[in-house]
Image (cartoon, rainbow, N blue to C red):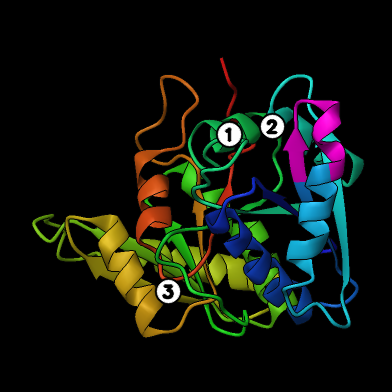
Amino acid sequence: MVQHIIVPVDGSEESWRALDTAIALARRVDDTSVDVVEVVFDPSDTGAAQLRLTERVAQHSISGLTVNTKVEVATDSVAAAVAALVDQHPEATVVMASHGRGRSAALLGSVAEDLLQRIYGPLVVVGPKATTTDFSGPIVITVDGSHASESVLPLAAAWGIELGADPWIVEVTDPNTVTPSDIPESAYPGRLARQLSRDSGHPVNFEVLHGKHVHDEVADLASGMDASLIVASTHGRTGVSRFTIGSTAAAFVRHAPCPVLLIRPPHLTTS
């Protein structure tokens, strides 16, 4: 599943945090290569960028791993250059920091949204509160009753199997919401968990949390169980009027104690 990892960096310290996550992920699975990529717009910057990449990668513990450095000259945008690399490796997973302040501007915001318009593959985002994990802990999968949120379930289960991690399907409900007395509040995530367990052939757990701020409840749960990942659709129940990363997904990234695996719903268009 995770056969090739692409790590965009932009010269900022923050962007290099993503490489630590990529290295930990590569060590968790077999036969995974890592490409560390910097995008430049002037071909004359290629040599200096390659030297920076080589020096910085050497500062990380990469023994036993296949780690390559690449400098891409962009004619359109950073996201277009990264998406072109993904096209060359359809099995690729992009791992990136949530913010960068180098030559290529911020790595979550315009670049991430542009990239998510161009690729359907998974995007692992390392937020400001995320710490490096060995990916042995559980995977928290967030759902909200929408088909968009549920579309992540098959891929999340596949990641759980490959990482040897327990998946937890989690719904957060408003504490003031009144549910019929004859319907258990866990009916929805429980149904999804049973179906996913049947489909994947592996156990799937579920949990209902209560709170007005979904990202806080999910972050607290992830922290308490030392989760490896939070998995979320880029869009959920509220839908979109234009293509932007949904507010809940963006909040997960800002508050999560672990990386967030964002998945664009396959039916979503950019129109």
The residue tagged 1 is 111
Residue 39 on the magenta segment: yes
At 74% across and 54% down in the image, what residue appears?
Answer: 93
First reached walking from the N terminus: tag 2 or tag 1: 2
Mark 1 lies on a secondary structure that is helix
Residue 99 spot, x, y in % from top left: 49, 48
The residue tagged 2 is 78
At 80% across and 34% down in the image, what residue appears?
Answer: 45
Mark number displayed over residue 206: 3
First reached walking from the N terminus: tag 3 or tag 1: 1
212 or 3: which is nearer to us?
A: 3
Q: Are marks 2 and 1 in contact (CB under 8 Å)?
A: yes
Residue 103 appears in the figure: yes
Residue 236 spot, x, y in % from top left: 42, 41
Is label 3 or label 2 in front?
A: 2
Q: Which stretch is magenta?
A: 38-47
Q: Quadrant of the C terminus?
A: top right
Mark 2 crowdedness (10 Å alpha carbons): few <14, some 14-19, many ≥20: many
Disc 3 to disc 1, C-alpha distance: 33 Å
